[in-house]
Amino acid sequence: MSVDFWINVGVLAGIYGIFTLGLQLNAGFTGLLNFGQAGFMAIGAYSIGILVVDHGWSLWLALPAAVLLACLASVVVGISSLRLRSDHFAIATIAFAEIVRYTLQNAAFSGGNQGILGFDDEWRAASGWMLSKLGAFGLGGYTQLPLLLVVWLSFVALLLALQGLQRTGWGRVLRAIREDEDATAALGKNVLSYKLQSLGLAAALAAIAGFFVALNVTYLYPTVFDPTFTFFGYAILVLGGFASYGGVAIGSLVFWALLEGTRLIDASLSAGQQASLRFIIVGLFLLLLSRLRPQGLLGNVNEMKVRP
Amino acid sequence: MSATPTVRASAAEDDASAVRSRLASPSRLTVLVAVMAVVFCLLAALFGLVPTAQATINGFVAGSYTGLGAIGLTLVLGILKLVNFAHGDLLVAGAYFTILFAWLGLPLPLAMLGAMVATAALALVTEKIVWQPLRQAKAGTLQLFLSAIGLGLVIRFSVQFFAGSQVRTLGANVVDSIALGPLRLGTLQAVALLVGLAAMLLVGLALRFTGIGKEMRAFADNRALAEVSGIDTQHVINMTWIVSGFLAGLAGILYATAIGSFNPNFGLTLLLSLFAATVLGGIGNAYGALVGGLVIGLSQEWSTLMFNARWKPAVGFALLILMLLFMPQGIFGRKKRGS
Amino acid sequence: MTAEPILEVANAVKSFDGLTAVAGASFTVEKGSITALIGPNGAGKTTMFDLLSGFAKPDSGAIRFAGQPITGKAPHRIARLGLVRTFQLTRVLAGMSVIDNMLLAAPRQPGQHLYSLLTAPRHANAAEDKARDAALSLLETFGLRSKAADYAGALSGGQRKLLEIARALMTEPSMVLLDEPMAGVNPTLGHTILDHIASLRQSNGTSFLFVEHDMDVVMNRADRIVVMAQGRVISMGTPEQIRADAAVIEAYLGGPAPEAKP
Ligand SMILES: Nc1ncnc2c1ncn2[C@@H]1O[C@H](COP(=O)(O)OP(=O)(O)O)[C@@H](O)[C@H]1O
Ligand SMILES: [Mg+2]
């Protein structure tokens, strides 16, 4: 197994780790079943592509702008549908992600199925510079190594920040909402506002993940942000563990190592069958884990309650 | 002594309110039909009678598979309190079972019938290996959601694994069409329309007059009450899955026939239209799902008079979101107890 | 002495689907009093609490708390004004520790707001430490100190009830609505709760409105009693006045009061 293979696994694990931190914040710590995370990721990534390519922005300025736009989208989604019952909210968020995908596929501004290309020159320059430094350690040949480092630095920093936040009074209110929102409101907490904050932060995390996806694939097209990818996030979540940020890191690594490992299975399968097999494995993960170990590897069974 | 009259009075009140709610549904249906008729007239005035009539026929075709597909979704939701995200993929399974059986040499009509039976069997299998054990383990909402999503992925990508992701047809003649005056209707679409409407009628009658149909509706309406009245729970649940799967198979075949070409991914997009029909008709209300399906189908096809046809699915999403926001109890729904 | 009212309800109406749960109820609660709300099952007491605490909006009628209108306000706004409720079916936050249940309820915590957390983290910590002391001493009073670190879901039914009341008091309320606080609690513990309520009224002037079915408790502990039946307030007054009220006897016995018989 080549080093490049493992670097790729690491990059994917880091990106989807960031993506899943948002789901953990929503589902694990607030009791919000956000099934539209891929939609926020798409909005983040496409905002960057459009701002850089069509409007000549710097990539580094486009990133915070994209994060803000994703937050804005989450406020629109949240204000309209957070008052719904939790199962209706879940359906509404899936519909949101489908609308985003559908729009990207069919609208003119997103390049439709042609996609968007050529937004990452600045990143390539930065990455080249990092590679030249890494060359001093004899690592100059691994072209994806800079991305791996940046992704994991970001992931770990965000993970630690969220862990810190969760220990504050703010994090306590979120958990209280997960347990019983009426009781929380009865104690004077503005439940809707906290849910919006939770959703907004998750959307910001999705936009950051979208930024890294864009750098990784170098080319934006709608199927990269298929709503199904939200379910990859949930597979990572249940694998790593419910209500545990550390679990997200473990879950994402295990998940992507297994999933990418399927590529190494004796290649009597066509490329299409390989791809299908990966999704089947994700599906089986979800089925088996929710049945056998719903709290996940590192999860906390006492906090494993999401009521209707 | 003095308590008896109160009891009687409240029973009479209950009767009165039952009558009122029975009266309320048809009157809302009348309103709905009237609204749709007004929209039709408006569209005809704006875009011409012939295109509007053509879109309306297409709308009935779309409405029949949406309505039939939504019945299973709404029954499972009402009876098992399960949001079955895998339901769209049962429709996919129905279409691909047909291809499989036709490939094995069955004539197309037989292959379709076989596919419906096979989809029903598949639904029953999921009950036995996924849902029954999860119910017994008292699984939480998130567990159920994730299992449904996992199951959907397994079904859809198993189909894709064996059949590939390329676009397929059911192998029937898609070019022939019938002319009805100035209107054109593909022969297959005509068949789909007739079969769809006939099936809707049959299902409606079966729910009304067969024992199991009544039991299923009673269950969806008020499970606790149905259970104390001595209905065999597991039997009703099994039948619910069989009916749900059979109709999903039928809806998938109708979709495949009417659309002509498809790939294994049509389930998720269609699922949102099915949800829209379900919410529109009121969760657990099988008749509501049929009506909701027709409304969704007509709205989607009518939208093509105004927008490019590629935005059709978006109309379904938009309707779904609007319904959830403004009428979560559906057009026929009463507000349930508990805030 | 004319006591000033803290809560005024005028002609509150609430119906569900044709069933009128509260049918034009009016009453007042005096500031600093312990008032009992009694009435047969289905009289509309819990629905009245929902209206007072903002969990249901009245179809018509007006509610004033501490001089300002609160009709139809959101639950968290009403709670912040100092009117806090507990639930008939206990609602502890099972997946959180007992102490976290208490700390959640602490008012004015900068640590509960992202903005102040980022701008003044020290301040947030100091406020939380103070809240923790207050929480532990309340837990001490309610005999839950030793359970502080346990998950609330692991408490017994009676302990949950205690925790819910302690949590409501943690918000530093000026008035507390208790829906059947003694139900499912053993009598000794029940009396501890009542003693504590009485001493809080004494020391802080907190007002209490509580629903209770045990007439001995109501008659001995309440300053005033409000009686509801079929969605209306049929009587209001001191325990002596209520004891003598024919309408109340009729409501409870389902027939005309003996004295009223011809
Ligand atoms: N959410 C609701 N939906 C429909 N009916 C309700 C609802 N809440 C209460 N009721 C009805 O209102 C009446 C009063 O109930 P409640 O306020 O709980 O009475 P109490 O607390 O005095 O026993 C009862 O008949 C009850 O069935
Ligand atoms: Mg009550």
Image: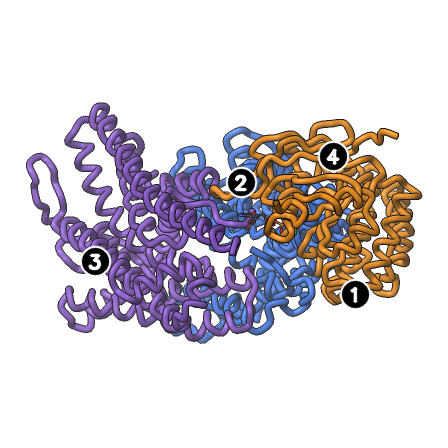
- With C130 as the anchor, is A308 left or right in this view? left
Location of mark 3 (residue): B202
- Classify mark 4: helix, strand or loop: strand
Name the tint of chain B in the rendering.
purple
Name the tint of chain A in the rendering.
blue
Label 2 lies in what chain? C
For residue C186, which numbered disc appears in the image?
A: 1
**Mark pair 2, 1: CA separation:** 35 Å
Where A283 falls versus A218 (above or below)?
A: below
**Mark pair 2, 3: CA separation:** 40 Å
- With C190 as the anchor, is B11 left or right in this view? left
- Classify mark 3: helix, strand or loop: helix
Amino acid at pointer 1: Asn
Amino acid at pointer 4: Thr
Mark 2 or mark 1, earlier in chain: 2
Label 2 environment density (alpha carbons within 10 Å; few <14, some 14–19, many ≥20): some
Location of mark 4 (residue): C28
Name the tint of chain C in the rendering.
orange
Location of mark 2 (residue): C15
- Classify mark 1: helix, strand or loop: loop
In front: label 4 or label 3:
4
